[in-house]
Image (cartoon, helix red, strand yellow):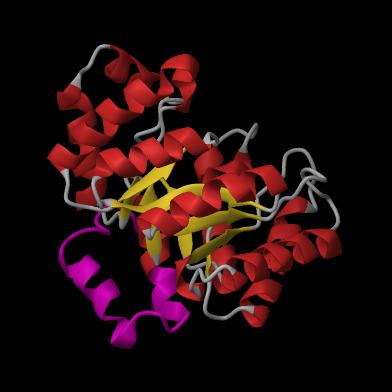
Amino acid sequence: MIIVGELINSTREKIRKAVAERNSAFVMDIARQQEAAGATYLDVNAGAFAEAELENLEWMVKTVREASALPLCIDSPKPQALAHGCVVAGGRAELINSISGEKERFRAVLPIVKEHNTNVVALAMDDAGLLEDEEAIYAVACRLVESLLSEGIAAERIFLDPLVRPIGTNSAYGNLTLNILRRITAQYPDIHKICGLSNVSFGLPKRKIINRAFLVLAMASGLDAAILDPLDKPLMALLKGAEALLGRDDYCMNYIAAARSGEFEQLE
């Protein structure tokens, strides 16, 4: 399972404060904790700073690079910020979040992906906006994947995001996402499927319960990457258990190693 550690995001109050105060020790500690917990990538997002996004993103990327050797996920709705983050990262930006089927965004982000040879999160959305119908979402996702493939982006570099919707606003949204994941996995077995896990529980109490349950269901439906909190120990334990059950952990060796190292203590 590919884990994008989500915690170095300026929408989080403590991170925003640390960045504003240039508290490098705090940010570096969060980076190290996520690496130790099993993150594959570290997400870096300075979007909450609006006009000062580029300046703060640069500081964040440099700070995280000092703390961890993990590759970075440069996360921004602005193509200019994505490009700047890749330059500052100096080859360590291996994932861009994100491109979509929106024509203007596709044209703006694709050259960045090509220039820096990055992997890319591809949002299943086009100029029609956020869709509700499964067939329409699936069609948009397929067109986006085909467009990226036709531009020479290898399948293994594509991380298709079906855009998880909060089940608190529509009880059908959970199954909607799971169905899309299954269909995309069947149609494009070589691409990755990713999601922002916590979106599913937005607005609900005790959100971590929903997040943990959804992760297991999504993995069984084809999800092989997620933007999540790797410091959530029960979540990570369920992830390892699900990998063993789904045949993604040969002879359960990763699960056994985690158990022997004490990762599951006080979770039973």
Please tell me whether residue 242 belongs to the stretch shown in magenta.
yes
Q: Splitting the image into 4 quarters, where does residue 203 fall? A: top right
Vertical placement of residue 15 versus 89, above or below: above
Please tell me whether residue 258 belongs to the stretch shown in magenta.
yes
Residue 204 visible from this viewpoint: yes
Vertical placement of residue 173 versus 149, above or below: above
Residue situated in front as seen by the camera: 193 or 233: 193
Residue at the image position 17 percent from the left and 51 percent from the top: 69
Residue 235 visible from this viewpoint: no
Location of residue 76 in the rendering, given as x and y in whole percent from the top left corner: 49, 36
Vertical placement of residue 55 versus 102, above or below: above
What segment is highlighted magenta in the picture? Answer: 241-268
Of all residues, the one furthest to the bottom in this rendering is 251
Residue situated in front as seen by the camera: 257 or 147: 147
Location of residue 204 in the rendering, given as x and y in whole percent from the top left corner: 64, 34
Residue at the image position 34 percent from the left and 44 percent from the top: 86
Q: How many discs appear?
A: 0
Residue 161 relative to residue 32: left or right? right
Residue situated in front as seen by the camera: 26 or 187: 187
Vertical placement of residue 243 versus 196, above or below: below
Residue at the image position 53 percent from the left and 34 percent from the top: 78
Q: Splitting the image into 4 quarters, where does residue 8 fall? A: top left
Q: Quadrant of the C terminus?
A: bottom left
